[in-house]
Amino acid sequence: MTVDVNTDADAGANAGPGTGPPVAPAVDPAVPLLLTCPNCNATDLVMDAGSRFCEECGYALAEPVTGEEEPPVHSGPKPCVSCGATEIDDEGYCIDCGDLQPRRRDRMEVDLGVVAGISDRGLRHHRNEDSMALRPAVAPNGRSVVVAVVCDGVSTSERPDEASAAAVSAAARLLLTAIASGAETGEDLTTRAVRAADAAVAALARDSDHGNPPACTYVSAVVGADTGVTLGWLGDSRAYWLDDAGSSRQLTRDDAEAGSHAIEAWLGADSGEPEPHVVSFLPPGPGVVLVCSDGLWNYVDQAADLAALALPAAATDPHAAAVRLVRTALDAGGHDNITAVLVPYPVQAPAEPAA
């Protein structure tokens, strides 16, 4: 496998995972996280080591959030938004007028405060083949951790949208379950998550795939309040470190032919069980971890430029920063699906709500 290193010009001579000096968290990592339930929108939900379900609706707080959770509003066939007909084909086109129908996956937005993400179909693709899963979690020892996973379906494979959805769900669920049980959030856990995602995508294969079973790329970040960042990836979905201190850098290396998008590693039945790349990174200070698909970095690939777009908003309002990043890619042409998830570091734990 050939691994091509993409080094940012502003990253510095020693820019690489693990090179930052140890730093103390800016907040007490044992303080409970304040969340809004993604299912019922209940606010002032305090998430601590004993919290497993929303007190209002019972939503499992250890489940990953993907942006697809909202239930359908129609029990029967959904009419065409253009002509009202109810015959819609498997690709989302109206049989009568031919118009493409909007889907929930066309634009998925998640804002959990301590982590936020947006996945957008873009302007040229007929469906969104990217997926994301994100969630804060609290370990039994009270330490706060954020999990973020982004996968990009390989368009030349069958059902790439299913591949990316299966991968992010399997990986995030394994990571969150392990964290809730007290498992160490190190490189071994991330390796197991990548392999779980690979198995989930491989299970989608059918005889009718004609040699092109579902496939996708993968990148994940486990961000601890006091343990730094653990990254795993295969393909050309990326992770970046962004700060305003001149240390912004790309943290992953693409599995792709130099100067092309011909990826050389992916998840799926024909992946050949590749060995995932897993690294740990201790940030040099406050900043933001960005995990994204190539629909974003196709237009802005230098870490310093991404930092200029995302900061300072991303430190306190990651959703607003994600909106700006995705909007930049759309304004530049939006030729691909676009996904951006932002995790401020250190993982913030807001004060408990007033009585």
Image (cartoon, grey):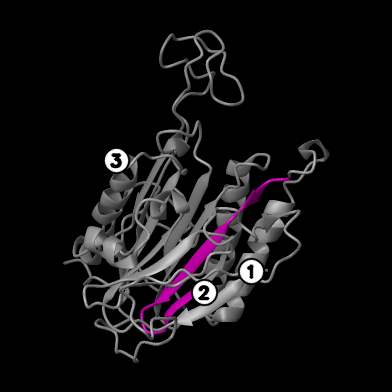
Give me the C-alpha separation between circle 1 and circle 2: 33 Å
Could you tell whether 201 is left or right of 69 in the image? right
Query: Which sits in the foreground, 124 or 312?
Result: 124
Q: Secondary structure at mark 2?
A: helix
1 or 2: mark nearer the eye: 1
Residue picked out by circle 3: 331
Q: Which mark is residue 2?
A: 1
Check contact, mark 1 vs mark 2: CB within 8 A: no
Q: Please give the range of residues in magenta.
A: 213-230
234 to 128, vertically: above or below: below
Q: Which quarter of the rendered picture does the C terminus lie within?
A: bottom left
Look at mark 2 in the image and give the residue it sits on. Answer: 179
Measured as percent of width and height from the top left, residue 309 is found at: 24, 58
Q: Main secondary structure of the magenta part?
A: strand
Label 3 crowd bin: few (<14), some (14–19), many (20+), radius 10 Å: few
Q: Where is residue 304, by image quadrant? A: bottom left
Assess whether residue 159 is covered by the magenta stretch: no
- Name the quadrant of the N terminus: bottom right
Could you tell which of marks 1 and 2 lies nearer the N-terminus?
Answer: 1
Q: Quadrant of residue 112?
A: bottom left
The reply, left or right, for residue 157 in relation to residue 339 is right
Q: Residue at x 46, y 54 (%)?
A: 293
